[in-house]
Amino acid sequence: MAMMRYAEALRSALREEMQRDPSVWLMGEDIAVYGGVFKVSKDLMAEFGPERVRDTPISEQTLTAMAVTAAMSGTRPVLEIMYADFLPLSVDALMNQASIYNYIWNGQVTMPFVLRTQGGGGAGAGAQHSKSLDALVAHIPGLKVVAPATAADAKGLLKAAIRDDHPVIFLEHKLLYNTRDEVPDGDHLVEIGKARIARVGSDVSIIASSKMVVDALKAADELAKEGISAEVIDLRTLRPLDRETIKASIARTHHAVVVNEGWCFCGYAAELSATIMESCFDDLDAPVERVATHDIPIPYSEPLESTVLPDANKIAAAARRALA
Amino acid sequence: MKNSPTVDEQLDMLGRMVAVRHLEERLGELHKAGKTRGPIHRCDGQEAVGIGATAMLDDEDLLTSTHRGHAHYVGKGVGLHPIVAEILGRATGACAGRAGHMLIADVKKGLLGGNAIVGGGIPAATGFAVSLQMKNRADGGQRVAMCIFGDGAAQTGICHESMNIAALWKLPVIFVLEHNQYGLTAHHSTQSSVPDLSVRAAGYGMPSEIVDGNDVIAVHRAVGAAVERARRGEGPSLIEAKTYRMVGFSTSDVGGYQKDEDLATWRERDPIVLARAMLADAVPAERLDAVMAAARAEVDAAVEQALGDPLPVFAEHAPSAPYTVAGA
Ligand SMILES: Cc1ncc(C[n+]2csc(CCOP(=O)(O)OP(=O)(O)O)c2C)c(N)n1
Ligand SMILES: [Mg+2]
């Protein structure tokens, strides 16, 4: 085990997979010479050269479409989109190209590319640099979507994503890059599609992902002081969803709070809520509580932004409501 | 020479450039002191482009800007206090604290607005130009749209699409390419195969000109001619202003990619020093000193006032339809 920052864990995953497989290459804006604006790809160009670590022009729509076809023709591109807020530029390539070919061409092609990006609010970056667009990509059939909350999962999931033969959208969070935790040594892989129990509890299941797991754990600490035992499920993968882990937890706690940092309306938390309704209805003692971002562009000023985003207090309040 | 600014206009532009520089310096300090949120994108060294290009615009002319828009905001006539208050997240800001420094808009002044989706301002100005063309034809007006955008933004697909449509429909729009050599940290040589991006205008049958972006008079002349052409209904132009950013990409920039000798060369060509020197024969030094001091004092007063202003309260600024609070 080694203590690592989330950003370092991502870098070690990229490095190990590039060492292991010469067909893996990286492209993105400011990722090569500068090492990425969040420094995830720092020093990788020096190690692997400018053919495998490429700085690109500001051309997200084209880059995404290129990643799709490069992946169909024998290499494994890892594309960095600097902010999740720019994903809408990628969405045509994801929705009308990447998602369809394996199916409509009857399995003749695979598409091993990873699109890494980072989202999330709380940094005062304003309405075009603070969004969580999980639902936008998780909506698309044919894509896998992962959103790690810890350094260990960041590493293990990124390695698994690069080895996957299908497109994987890899959602990081700007406020997690400097968080640290223990990362297992060696060839550490985390299976895509498996959630993790981040904290065991018996009264209520809080289901979250990415930075919301950190907030859910804080909420669980607060609730514990009131004698409420909250279980926190870190989904890790948003699509395909690990329904079994959710079901097993709710079968024990009989109460559920679903959390997502994206907008509330038609958001990812709504999908969780519907899933629980469909598969855990008989186990529930109360309606599912949902915590998500107000349906408003993320404002800049601190008192406005903090009101709009979900946080530990809102999660704890939702758990209390579920148990009331 | 045609489109040359008068001495009074030059003095006005000098004052605005000094205000922008001092604003950037004060914002740098405020950021260090933790009084602003997110990164600040300063335009030190580029003031002549934003100020020179907007000097001949009226409030009815519409401007789109970028993430690095402080000179554009000031050039378009937005007040210093609403700008600073917005950047400090105050209720008194140009957008009541909702927008932050990259996204400021002021409809009364025809600034619509900053944009932090790189390239986003280019089709935006093109769309404004369609509407203005229709209104001009209806009432005989001469309104124009202007887009100031970076060399990085010039590489986006929407830049090509916008220029094609603007030329095709002869839209009253002026594309001002603020070429500061870098897109974020990436040197232009890693972004395009040609150093002069204005050669592309030929592909749209659109006139273009390269201008020294650190010479405010040269910018004023070249852009002024393009604005007149657009006002006459003769269509769009592309002006490529060559300049250099004398500070980091933003307050988050850890540096290491700008060459010391480049920085030194461009500092010698500081647009404010050049603008002052060009007035030296016509205006006594004391008057120039006074203009510059007044500009700085105006910024300082705006900062002091904004620091004392209240932060917004969510409930008072409650969103109205089509926006809603979660679950409502
Ligand atoms: C669509 C999009 N892609 C990437 C970014 C990140 N980004 C912000 S500024 C910038 C560079 C822009 O370069 P340029 O247009 O030359 O403007 P400058 O910063 O030099 O003023 C990049 C890549 C963004 N904001 N929007
Ligand atoms: Mg630039």
Image (cartoon, coloured by chain):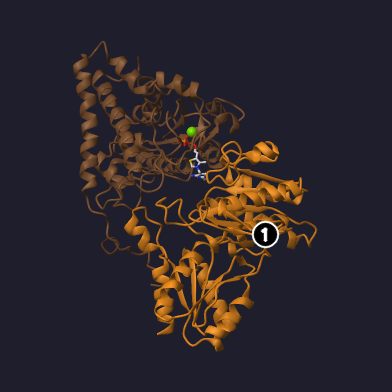
Q: Which quadrant holds residue B234?
A: top left
Residue B296 at x, y = what percent? 24, 31
Residue B43 at x, y = what percent? 39, 33
The residue lying toward the viewer, choosing from B68 and A249, is A249
Residue located beneath label 1 in the image: A99
Q: Quadrant of the C terminus of chain A?
A: bottom left
Label 1 beta carbon within 8 A of ligand 1: no
Viewer can see residue B19: yes
Residue B206 at x, y = what percent? 51, 28
Q: Residue at x 30, y 20 (%)?
A: B5
Residue that sits furthest to the top in the current view:
B281
Q: Which quadrant holds residue A57?
A: top right
Viewer can see residue B57: no
Chain given the colour brown: B
Residue A310 at x, y = what percent? 42, 66
Q: Is residue A2 shown left or right of residue A304?
A: right
Q: Which quadrant holds residue B135?
A: top left
The residue lying toward the viewer, choosing from A188 and A51, is A188
B80 w.r.t. B273: above or below: below
Mark 1, secondary structure of its residue: loop
Q: Is residue B85 shown left or right of residue A169?
A: left
**Chain A in the picture: what colour?**
orange
Chain under disc 1: A
Residue type, numbered disc 1 = Ser
Q: Is residue B201 shown left or right of residue A239?
A: left
